[in-house]
Image (cartoon, helix red, strand yellow):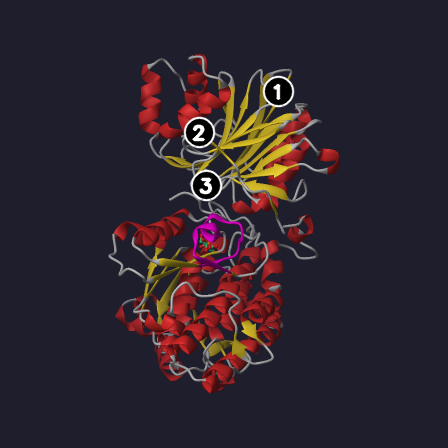
Amino acid sequence: MCGIVGILGARPVAGTLLETLKRLEYRGYDSAGVATLENGQITRRRAAGKLKNLEACLAAEPLFGHLGIGHTRWATHGRPTAINAHPHQNGKVAVVHNGIIENFKTLRDELRAKGHTFASDTDTEVVAHLVDAAMSDGLAPAEAVAATLPRLKGAFALAFLFEGEDDLMIGAREGAPLVVGFGAGDKTGEFYLGSDALALAPLTDALAYLEEGDYVVLTRHGAKFYDTESRPVARKRVKTPASAFLIDRGNYRHFMDKEIHEQPEVIGRVLAHYLDLSAGTVALPFELPVDPARLPRLTIAACGTAYMAGLIASYWFERIAKLPVEIEVASEFRYREAPMQKGGLMLLISQSGETADTLASLRYAKQQGQKILSVVNVATSTMARESDVAALTLAGPEIGVASTKAFTCQLALLACLALAFGRARGTIDAKEEARLVAELMAVPGLMAEVLHREPKIELLARDLGKARDVLYLGRGTSYPLALEGALKLKEISYIHAEGYAAGELKHGPIALVDSDLPVIVLAPRDRVFEKTLSNVQEVAARNGRIILISDSAGANDLGGEAEIIAMPDMAPEFSAIVYALPVQMIAYHTAVFMGKDADQPRNLAKSVTVE
Ligand code: F6R
């Protein structure tokens, strides 16, 4: 999604704006721009494509203002051209925007009827026109922003500059995140705006988050926050733990590669946080917002990979805690008007904690009298702040657009939650808890072992890179993992892939099977293992190309008929966490072999703050 940055400084800011935008690249974007204010005049530089194009523009025609805003744009309205890139300007106002102005057509028609002409196809440009028009009517800049915000429907984070005002920057938020940074030391008196703490990490760790509907007026004398009714409000200053070094790629070729390899370590961290490793029990460091023993059902909503994590967890909650689970993609759930019994529990899963549909589901569930438990990676995110309890996935910043370590950390934490629910509901006794905890504790070591399969997977990827379509099959928790495998391959290699429940094969997809179609089968030795192998035989009988991800049992049974990615033998319950690794490595190496940008796949955004 779009990234926003603003600097109100004491020296030229264009270079720092550009550096800060580089830290927002992970969010996904297709054009970029900056504007600074010099001698009272706004000057912009914008470019389609990657930041190096904007860097070249700035090298050819530098900007020298001490006050500026910058933007990476993920196109929603209008193609990713330089004209549509932000900042947008009308008259005295320049603006950058993350989100969608849903009523922009109505507003644009209204403005056109008054004689306004528009330079771009974007929804954002109406904001510059509205604020400028309000200033032409005699309002001061902050009043003009305050008068404009209630007219905008949708989700937005905005940052403004104003011609003739070299000590003023304004930010506003409704449905998309925005944070204010406070300069310290030799930067005392500097103020920043950013889409997230990571972007501002090299500049400051002192931050204040805008609440929904807030706007903030920044001058070199301070930051003044106002709520939706334009009443002055105090917003707490916090220290953020995100530090500059955390987003270093190290020796890895891509962040995705680094994040795949970090998993044994980060999963260990999650388990150490949510289990008592010496006692061999689950030990949640927070109190659950409901009594699991009295809970009639659990509702889960999430998007994309986080939804797959929820699907896998639904098997665990049902089997371990005997708790009925309803799970839905958040974009559907939010509009279903599902009646919810008061006092129930809603579980939201999100890496960013900002995904618009998941956040809307959270708010809907709240209105329905549900307690909210969120599983999020970003501790300062909107979802974390709006939940009764936010359980953190502790994956550290995930920069690759395709989720890897955040997914497995979600799984590890959800497994701990399922155990805690099982214990509270009396569906597992102490012995069973100890057995399952021991299974979980084995996961980081098993993951480390699986990373050694990389050379084999790299070779396999050379083959997969030539395929037109790929099928993933699995049963039990391997079924959602098959969906995740297909999603991962699609999003970074652009090869068409489908995930299927292996038992569904003969109800349709088997028609696709021929010697050109790679069929990747996830078959840990669990209670449906034999059934999965029967489905594999059905593929083999039709000359399908089988790639079997399985342990020694699978290799013994199908050694002759399939290419095997040999997994270590393991207890079955939490195999999905370990089997996620080959699935991710297959996607990664296929994309790299095909020359694709694994970290920033086309069209995708890291934090999806629009519907
Ligand atoms: C896929 C991927 C996405 C996200 C989805 C939800 O690799 O990363 O499908 O999982 O956009 O994002 P969060 O978890 O931030 O809510």
Dots 3, 1 in contact, CB < 8 A: no
Q: How many marks?
A: 3
Dots 3, 2 in contact, CB < 8 A: no
Q: Residues within 10 Å of mark 1 (few under 14, many from 20)?
A: many
Q: Which of marks 3 and 1 is nearer the N terminus?
A: 1
Alpha-carbon span between mark 3 and mark 2: 19 Å
Disc number placed over residue 176 in the picture, else none: 3
Q: Residues within 10 Å of mark 3 (few under 14, many from 20)?
A: many
* Most foreground residue, 483 or 160: 160
Q: Can you identify the residue that label 2 sits on?
A: 230
Q: What kind of element bears circle 3?
A: loop
* Most foreground residue, 56 or 309: 309
Q: The magenta stretch spans which residues?
A: 374-391
Q: Can you identify the residue that label 1 sits on?
A: 166
* Most foreground residue, 211 or 571: 211
Q: What residue type is labelled 2?
A: Ser
Q: Which amino acid does label 1 sit on?
A: Asp
Q: What residue type is labelled 3?
A: Ala
Residue occupying image coordinates x 62% and y 31%: 7
Q: Which of marks 3 and 2 is nearer the N terminus?
A: 3
Q: What kind of element bears circle 1?
A: loop
Residue 571 in view = no
